Image (cartoon, rainbow, N blue to C red):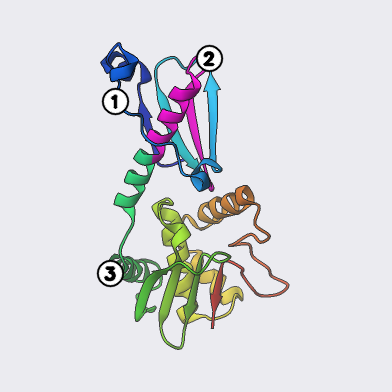
Amino acid sequence: MAAPSTRGRPDQDQQSRPASPQHSPAAPAPPEPHDRGRVEVRRSARRSRTVSAYREGDRTIVLIPARMSHSEEQRWVAQMLEKLAAQESRRILGDDALMERARGLSAAYLGDRAQPVQVRWVTNQNSRWGSCTPSEGTIRLSHRLQGMPEYVLDYVLLHELAHLLVPDHGPAFWALLEAYPRTERARGYLEGVVSAARLPHIPGARHADRGVDPACSCG
C-alpha cells in the first residue's frame, strides 16, 4: 500500500538547530518496538534533501538520504511515523459515517435494496476484513481497514451489503459486485496486503469449488 505519504527536508531542519549539541532540542522518541519491527528504511545516494514515507501492507517504508547518520535516521523515522499516523487518523470514519457510506453504496450499486440496520468497526477480526449477519442486518468491518484507500473500504462495505441480499458466494452474489468498477483493483490491493503480512489466506479470493470467500463471514 503506497498511501498516505509524507515528506520532510532534513537539511532545513539541520539549519534551524543550534550549533552547539548540548543546547539542541530533544529528539523525538524512537518508534515503539512493535512499530520498529514494521519499518523498513531505504537509503538512496540520489536523495540529498528530502525524507518521505508511505505504507506498504503492514510495513512503513521510510526513504532517506544515504549520508544521514544513525541518530538522524532514528529521529526522522519517529517523525515520519507520527505524521503518517496523524494523516490516517483524520481519514478514519466513525460508525455513523460508515452507515451513511453503506447507504450511499447500496443506492449507487444495489438499487437501494440492501438496508443495513447497523454498520460498525470491530477489533476482533484479524483473519477477515468484514462480516455480516443477514438475519439481523448488521455489518462489522475489521479495524485493519482503517487508513486504507477509500475504494478498498467501499469494496468491503459493498461486499457485505451484497450478503444482505445473497448470503452465499454463488454466481448471483458475484454478479452484484460486478457493478462496482474497482472490484478487481480492491481485491488485488487486499491480496497484496495479505501477501506482505504472510497470512495463510487471501481475503477476497474467489473459491468457485467451495462457494466461500475468506474475506468475510456471514451467518
Residue receiving disc 1: 25
Specify the amino acid type for callout 1.
Pro
Residue lying at the far top of the rendered structure: 19
In the depicted structure, whether residue 82 falls above or below residue 136: above
Residue 23 locus on image (x, y percent)? 28, 19
Tags 2 and 1 touching, CB below 8 Å: no
The residue to which callout 3 is attached is 96
Asked if the magenta segment contains residue 203, the reply would be: no
Identity of the residue furthest to the right in this view? 209
Within the magenta stretch, is there residue 70? yes
Pinpoint residue 196: horizontal percent, then vertical percent.
Answer: 61, 47
Read off the magenta span.
57-81
Callout 3 amino acid: Asp
Q: Quadrant of residue 17?
A: top left
The residue located at (41%, 35%) in the rendering is 78
Q: Can residue 215 be seen in this snapshot? A: yes
Q: Residue 219 location, x and y as percent?
A: 54, 83
Cα separation, mark 3 vs mark 1, equals 42 Å
Residue at point 46%, 44% (across, down): 32
The mark that comes first in sequence, 2 or 1, is: 1
Label 2 amino acid? Ala
Secondary structure, mark 2, is loop
C-beta proximity under 8 Å, tags 2 and 3 = no
